[in-house]
Image (cartoon, rainbow, N blue to C red):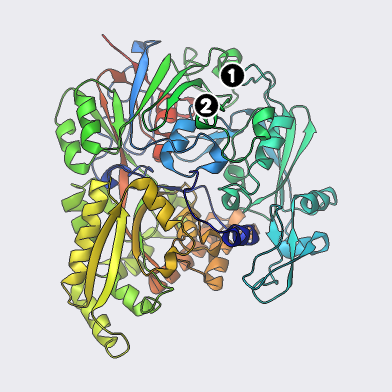
Amino acid sequence: MSQDTKESGTVLNRRRLLQGAGAAGVTAFAGCTGDGNGDGNGNGDGNGNGGNGNGDGNGNGDGNGNGDDQGEIQEGGTLRIGGTANVDSFDPPYSTDTTSTMAQNFIFEGLTTTDSEGNVYPWLAESYELLETNDVDRTAYADYMVSLPADDEGVIDTDEQIIIQHPEDDPLSQDEVRVLTPAEAADAVSDGTFGMQYRYELHEGVTFSNGEEMTATQVVNSLRRYENSDVSAQTFDSVLHIEEVDEYTVDIFAQIIDAEAEGQLPGFVVFTEEQSQAAGGEIDPRQEYMPIGTGPFVLTEFSDESFAEYEKNDSYWLEELGIQNKSWFEGPEDFPSGPVIDAIEFEIIPDNATRSAALQNDEIDTTLGLSSSTLDEFESSEDYNVDVVEAGGYTYIQYPLQVEPWDNPQLRRAVNHLVPREAIVNNILNGYGSPAWTDIPTPAQGSGTADYEALLEEIKPTNEYNPERATELLEELEGDIDFPIEVQMETNADNDDRVALVELIAESMEQTDFFEVEVETYEWNTYVGRVLDPEYGERGHIPCIGLSGTFNPGSFCNALHHSDNVGQCCNLVGVDNAELDDLIDDARYGTDVAESVEARGEAYDEVWSVLADERYSSITHFSVNSTVSSNEFRGFNGYPFSESTYSYGLYAPTDEQIAWVNRE
């Protein structure tokens, strides 16, 4: 999101300093939707409630959601979507909230795409391949690095994107540190120093909605626009360099061998040549700068905090190419080469009750993230379809470990035993979710653990609601800590389920007589700006918020706990543990974990064990991504991450997914 924060230059520079070894996948803050239903980020792995006839309940839509046959497809019409929050920005590198990404996904596209299980397919690229790997570590770039001054607070004096900082240097204790910026990265690549080299052959004839042809030049300049952006730490945790080979070929280089390189290296959208030169956050109708992409829709009108309107891109490149000419497509010959609807009306309706009423009054066709208490009503009606998908996100609280007595891990472990995970899922979420007995949900378990059942046996006892054990741990701390501890818990007011969740945890804590808890709530944008303030961790509050992870298991530990993400999404309290950083990095980077899923799972199991012991955060539950639609919206199947719910549901040939509007 365009972050409404008061970040100082110091923190922004420190962010640049720490880039190069960190975030795994682009995570996004959850907004105003019900936690049991994807809480604005596709948050959840949701056991139970299945797919309700809408696909298979795992996001694996077959294009026949809601019992519809693709032979019934109707072309044309307008889809009316009820959005859960305002579109904060239409500029992808300068936004990290789910609603903004959802709105952008109708317009912009990338080199690759994924199906509902995370498999990667070439998209704007006709094909791609891994050309070369070199088993190097980041010290291999020492000869190319430049020395830059650092002040007493560890701020490096540069406006350049820092790709890598030398692992042996410490800006907090040294006057100068060695860093690699884009210019030096290019020199290293030209000498053959890099970890991985991927080559992307672009489709010829791809045009943006303004008629400009996409070539390698736009692709190269688009990635460079992500330098020093709001998501730069999650972009340049792996990317080393990009270069144009010829008019329709680009190479992207990784710093070291990366198990997530196939999905992460091309993790950016492609801009027109003019847009690639735009200032940060400028691509936005509020700045009188309409976004232009290669995607199937064109933004035609936007009213801040009210609505966004889109029309079909009449020159959509895939309709010119034909989906059957995609080498990986094995669907029916008559499968459309793009979405079949003509227009989208994206109505911004943050209030759950108002959005539910709009659906019932035929003012919108579909929405997501309704409060759990509302879902059962729609589930029982023949006039609506409720699509429930195992999702890839979570809701969590974080402890203010920079403030005494919260720097004591035993205190944090005690409070974790007071988090009533089953009561949250059963009583607040009406079963639309699952307790977070471990830190890894179903969509990321494949490479996120070597043996999930063994992990569950180890970690679950540390996460069970156990007031007796909590009391024992707290009594052992008497004399070292003055009780009762006064603490403020915080969350966003426009999420009914999340407010109820926080109030339940606060009540549980107060029942021990060791705590006096006050609950404060804030409007969503105000809350995001508050928790992203770099000084937030020093205030001693306990924030509660939701995140969307990715298919990458690192997104369920990195964003919250890696020092790269201090002062941004989503290490809100300043977790800074060098040994933990190394464990998180070692689970993603290196030949062993890149070549062996088992080795990678074993590495992540070490991470989950450390997190259970340190207990910097408590994940309360993995929820589900629920979408409610009228019977006029046909063929829809959801996606594990709600920022892609509608772009996927409208058209995803990777899963032969297509949806349409039937007004009969």
**Residue 602, x across and y down, in percent:** 50, 63
**Residue 41, x across and y down, in percent:** 38, 43
Residue 409 vs residue 178: left or right? left
Of the image marks 1 and 2, the number of the one nearer the N terminus: 2
As drawn, which residue projects farthest toward the right?
A: 191
Q: Residues within 10 Å of mark 1 (few under 14, many from 20)?
A: many
**Residue 555, x across and y down, in percent:** 48, 53
> Which residue carries the number 2 mark?
107
Question: Which residue occupies 80% across, 48% down?
Answer: 186
The foreground one among 343 and 176 is: 176
Residue 341 quadrant: top left
Question: Which residue occupies 23% across, 63% down?
Answer: 505
As drawn, which residue projects farthest toward the bottom?
A: 479
**Residue 63, x across and y down, in percent:** 38, 24
**Contact check, label 1 and label 2, Cβ < 8 Å:** yes
Q: Amino acid at mark 1?
A: Ser
User: Element under label 2?
Assistant: loop
The disc label shown at residue 209, or none: 1
User: In whole angstroms, how far apart are the C-alphas of marks 1 and 2?
Assistant: 9 Å
